[in-house]
Image: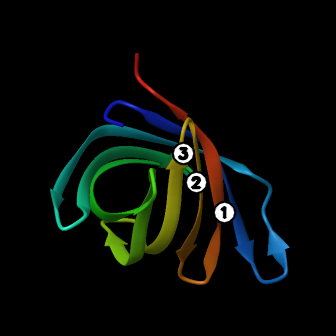
Amino acid sequence: MTGASLVGHFVVSVPGRETPPQDENYRVNEIRKVEGGRWLFNAQMKFGGRDVTLPMIFKVEWAGDTPVITVTDQELPGLGTFTARVLIYGDRYAGTWQHGKAGGHMWGRLERSK
């Protein structure tokens, strides 16, 4: 996935309402296994009017041949605390996320570097 981008959309779901889909873009500059099922993702993220590049360590679980990025109450510097489950299969990704009282869904396509 090094050099790939996850390009898609997310919605914010709070009790009683859901926002229209908003654009998101995650560029994976580097990914490498570190230890104990944990992986270092150095990624540029564009979502909700923000554009940041961060090194982040996430646990990756496997459902057969499908990686599931697993984040539980994890602090992302400058962004806050998140919980998320994002699976990647073929050229698509989908997941759920939570940030305080707000949460939602995300989905899109994986664009691999040529």
For the residue pair 94 and 56, the one nearer the viewer reads as 94
Give the residue type that dot 1 points to: His
In the image, taking residue 73 as reference, residue 21 lies left or right, namely right
Q: Which residue is mark 2?
A: 48
Separation of marks 1 and 2 at Cα, in angstroms: 14 Å
Q: Is residue 3 above or below residue 13?
A: above
Give the residue type that dot 3 points to: Tyr
Q: Residue at x 83, y 74 (%)?
A: 17
Residue extending farthest front: 64
Q: Which quadrant of the figure has residue 43?
A: top left
- Give SS at disc 2: loop
In the image, taking residue 67 as reference, residue 87 lies left or right, namely right
- Residue 105's mark? 1
Q: Which residue is mark 3?
A: 89
Q: Residue at x 47, y 75 (%)?
A: 83
Q: Is residue 113 above or below residue 99?
A: above
Residue 69 in picture, x, y percent from top left: 42, 61
In the image, taking residue 75 as reference, residue 55 lies left or right, namely left
